[in-house]
Image (cartoon, rainbow, N blue to C red):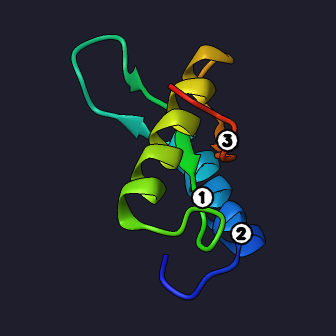
Amino acid sequence: LIDTDHATARAVVESLRVSFAVVNHSSVDPPLHVTFSAGLAVFPTFNTALALTQGADAALYLAKREGRNRSVSGTPALRL
């Protein structure tokens, strides 16, 4: 999300995550219910494209380890 501060980005991702979780997807019995996790990284905390990607990736894996269906913000200390 270009030109978006951390709080706004987090709010957008959380809104998407919550909205997506209530969608019932057509499938063979039973209906398919899915969720997603997200990792966030913001500039200038992560000051290169590679650092942003790695920060978001590390945060995503942390979200999955913590139980999935959540978003986590990356920090420079967070490593894969």
Q: Quadrant of residue 14 in the image?
A: bottom right
Residue type for callout 3: Val
**Disc 1 residue crowd, few under 14, some 14–19, many 20+, Cα 10 Å:** some
How many numbered discs? Answer: 3
Residue at the left extreme, as displayed: 28
- Give coordinates of residue 44: x percent, y percent: 62, 73
Residue that label 1 marks: 13
- Give coordinates of residue 37: x percent, y percent: 53, 36
Residue that label 3 marks: 72
From this view, report whether residue 28 is shown above or below residue 55.
above
- Is label 2 in contact with label 3 (beta carbons under 8 Å)? no
- Give coordinates of residue 52: x percent, y percent: 47, 58
- 63 and 54: which one is in front? 54
In this view of the protein, can residue 21 be seen by the observer?
yes
Residue at the right extreme, as displayed: 7
Relative placement, left or right, of 49 versus 35 is left
**Disc 2 residue crowd, few under 14, some 14–19, many 20+, Cα 10 Å:** some
Q: Earlier in the sequence, mark 1 or mark 2?
A: 2
Q: Earlier in the sequence, mark 2 or mark 3?
A: 2
Residue type for callout 2: His
Secondary structure state at the residue bearing disc 2: helix
Residue that label 2 marks: 6
Residue that appears at 71% across and 69% down: 6
From this view, report whether residue 25 is shown above or below residue 2.
above
Residue type for callout 1: Val
